Image (tube, helix red, strand yellow):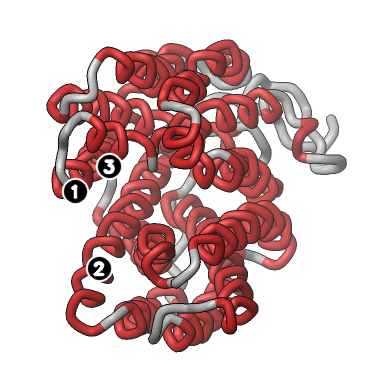
Amino acid sequence: MSGAPLGPSGALTSPRGSVWSSPGMLALALLATAGFTGYASLLPVAPLWAVAGGADSAGAGLVNFVLLGTTVATQFAVPWAVRRAGWALVLSLGMVFLGVPSLLHLLTADLGPVLALSAVRGVGFGILTVAANAAAVLLVEPARRGAAVGAYSFALSLPLVVVMPVGGWVAESVGFWPVFAVGALPLAGIPACLAVARHLPHRSTHDAGHTEVAEPGTPRATSLALLRPTLVLLAITFAGGAVITFAPQMVEVPWLSAAGLFAVGLLSAVTRWQVGGLADRTGAQRLLVPAVLVTVLVLGSFAWVVRTPVDTSRALPWILVCALVGVCYGTLQTLTMLRAFEAAGPRRVGAASAVWNAGFDTGTATGSLVVGGVAVASGFGPGMALAALLCLLTVPLARARPRPPR
């Protein structure tokens, strides 16, 4: 019998060729693109819609806070839901919860309903992030896990690069309804959910060499092992959340903000994709410490550039340092995700995905809150220097080599 590994359906798979040739991967990319397009399109626009309905800036700020809060709360329940209801139903419900509220926004701009719809969207996004991440790992053999995570990450990053930067402009220049229509695109991804589910066991992932998405309870050792890469992730998303939120306030000319955010998004997407294959060849652990150290230097440089508002005379350093932040942002996302899956082991893929995604969203929200508070008193330079310091403090966590799970 051939020594090639078995896929989820029991068919032989080969590590040769593109990872996209693995059964279910193209469908997963379509699912991710549709789902994240719906998420990204409303991220800057739903708060604007609340303002159009009479909310003040504090009320508008609650919109995405509620979104991320319900996202994190949902993520920990997703492995249980997959065990109970199966991949097809859970993934499809995630797309429904993401897409339908976008259309319902057209009914009212009052803050209360907008917050309620954001909460529902958070449930959908929590399902999408955890279940799709786990599926990306389980559709391929372990030797190609990095390439699969990288390819999936690239697919979900494209909407963040293309859709999110123009959403606010479209809403204010054309109207809100085109954005809400695009925000319903997750509904078109439901057939892709069913296609992905066909290549995964119905309720768990204990089949043909793969094991369960999650078991009831995670041993303390596994929880500690998951905590290490998650805290490294939290540090870089703390910085990324601050850059994404405050880029318009760090510059004096609006086009500099757009150019910087585009550089962050594009380089992050490409790097997440490419680093996955590199990690398969060299090992994620060997890359993680150098990546963290480079990130500390890049964030320190960023803090220096934004010590005063950036004008056109410093456009080149601004765009360059934003591009480098994107490289670090994408690199550490992929590497920490792979380390989380390694730390959890094949029997707790869902737990690893839930913890990693919760760390991502917590870091993003915390970075926006803390750096904003520091900036009020001292400016964005000290705020981003704090982000660099937090990354430096995670070096011991990045160096840790947990024992392989049993």
Viewer-closest of 288 and 317? 317
Please give left or right for residue 367 compared with residue 141 in the image.
left
* Residue at position x 39%, y 23% in the image: 98
Chain-order first, disc 1 or disc 3: 1
Q: Where residue 207 appears, x then y in whole percent?
A: 55, 24
Report, in whole angstroms, how far the alpha carbon at label 1 lies from the one at label 2: 14 Å
The answer to whether the residue labelled 2 contacts the one labelled 3, judged by CB atoms less than 8 Å apart, is no
Please give left or right for residue 321 compared with residue 70 in the image.
right
Query: Pointer 1: residues within 10 angstroms few (<14), some, or many (20+)?
Result: few
Chain-order first, disc 1 or disc 2: 1
Q: Where residue 242 appears, x then y in whole percent?
A: 36, 65
* Residue at position x 28%, y 39% in the image: 47
Q: Is residue 228 above or below residue 181?
A: below
Report, in whole angstroms, how far the alpha carbon at label 2 lies from the one at label 3: 15 Å
Q: Which mark is residue 57?
A: 1
* Residue at position x 30%, y 64% in the image: 367
Q: Quadrant of residue 258?
A: bottom right
The answer to whether the residue labelled 1 contacts the one labelled 2, judged by CB atoms less than 8 Å apart, is no
Give the secondary structure at mark 3.
Answer: helix
Q: Is residue 178 above or below residue 284?
A: above
* Amino acid type, callout 3: Asn
